[in-house]
Amino acid sequence: MSTGGQPEEARTTYREAMREALREALSADDRVFLMGEDVGRYGGCFGVSLGLLEEFGPERVRDTPLSESAFVGAGIGAALAGMRPIVEIMTVNFSLLALDQILNNAATLLHMSGGQLPVPLVIRMTTGAGRQLAAQHSHSLEGWYAHIPGIRVLAPATIEDARHMLAPALADPDPVLIFEHGSLYNASDELSPSAAPVDIDHATVRRPGTDISLITHGGSLSKALAAADELSIEGISAEVVDLRTLRPLDNEAITATVARTHRAVIVDEAWRTGSLAAEISARIAEGSFYELDAPVERVCSVEVPIPYARRLEEAALPQTSDIVAAAHRAVG
């Protein structure tokens, strides 16, 4: 049913939103195709592409051999030839097997050819821990890729972003990496049918506040919002900023939130040393030092390979209680 002539919001999951984004892309443009390990008959390792093979056929939804270097390279070649490939890598650790293709080919060809060879490629991969998949499948390496010029790095943290980030990513002339946190696939929320494509150039404020800024992305957004709820009970008003795009970072949004609250906690599931949190902290020090009323706090994973045992894994990862404690230190 609809209200006042407007379509009614429908509840959906992050997984279903990603699938609908893929379906829309495949329907809208014959140049778009999906390729990766088990994306066809199996429906994707995380079920995102379930049913798309039957709907679009094996030319548009292509199962590949177990060789990330080969099929990412094939995606780069297809993009150079005028196609709009979407390459799925099961989990971020497997992307290391294609790092040469991503860094030395996808990210560089446009620049090394004097602008003659754009690579309009989208690579999707699952990232993050919290699901007892042990050390090899629990990496958060978004910050590694955000270090590389020539690519765009996206981290959809909401149902709406999962649904509407893909279209602008496909329209980008540069390679785009989309990091989907594995803990989000079963998350559900209302999705407005009238929602527009996401602005992939700017961060967004998910919750306004006046006392402290909680800056985060991806799977840590829900923890930051939960921390803001807890802090509000104590009379502390926390602003929650979702970075959305990790390369290029939205410097203006970071500067603006610090100017409003004068305190910052950066929540990043990656390891602290050399992290995206370190980069954001440095930028705040460079551009907003005199706005700060307290040192910048960072909440990151413990610097160990992520454990398999549930309690050890939970202890290693940033939790809502850690964010609240960091906020208390900053507020004093």
Image: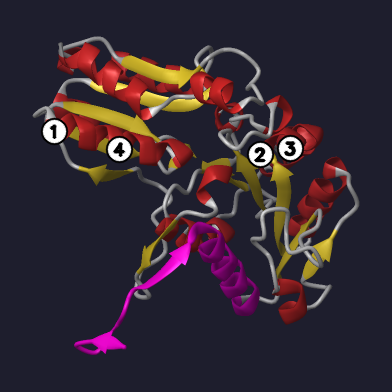
Where residue 285 appears, x then y in whole percent?
A: 30, 13
Height in image: 140 above or below 40?
Answer: above
Q: What is the distance, in whole Å, between disc 4 and disc 2 at their CAs?
A: 43 Å
Q: Say left or right for 163 vs 326.
A: right
Dot 4 or dot 1, earlier in sequence: 4
- The residue carrying mark 1 is 233
* Mark toward the viewer: 2 or 1: 1
Disc 4 residue type (three-letter): Ala
Report the residue marked by disc 3: 95
Dot 2 amino acid type: His
On the question of residue 104 being in view, the answer is no
Q: Which residues are magenta?
A: 1-28
Marks 2 and 1 close (CB-CB < 8 Å): no
Report the mark closest to the observer, 3 or 1.
1
Which residue does the numbered mark 2 point to in the structure image?
111
Disc 4 target residue:
226
Choose between 8 and 132: the one closer to the eye: 132
Q: CA distance from mark 2 to mark 3?
A: 22 Å
Type of residue at label 1? Answer: Ile
Quarter holding the C terminus is top left
Q: CA distance from mark 3 to mark 4?
A: 31 Å
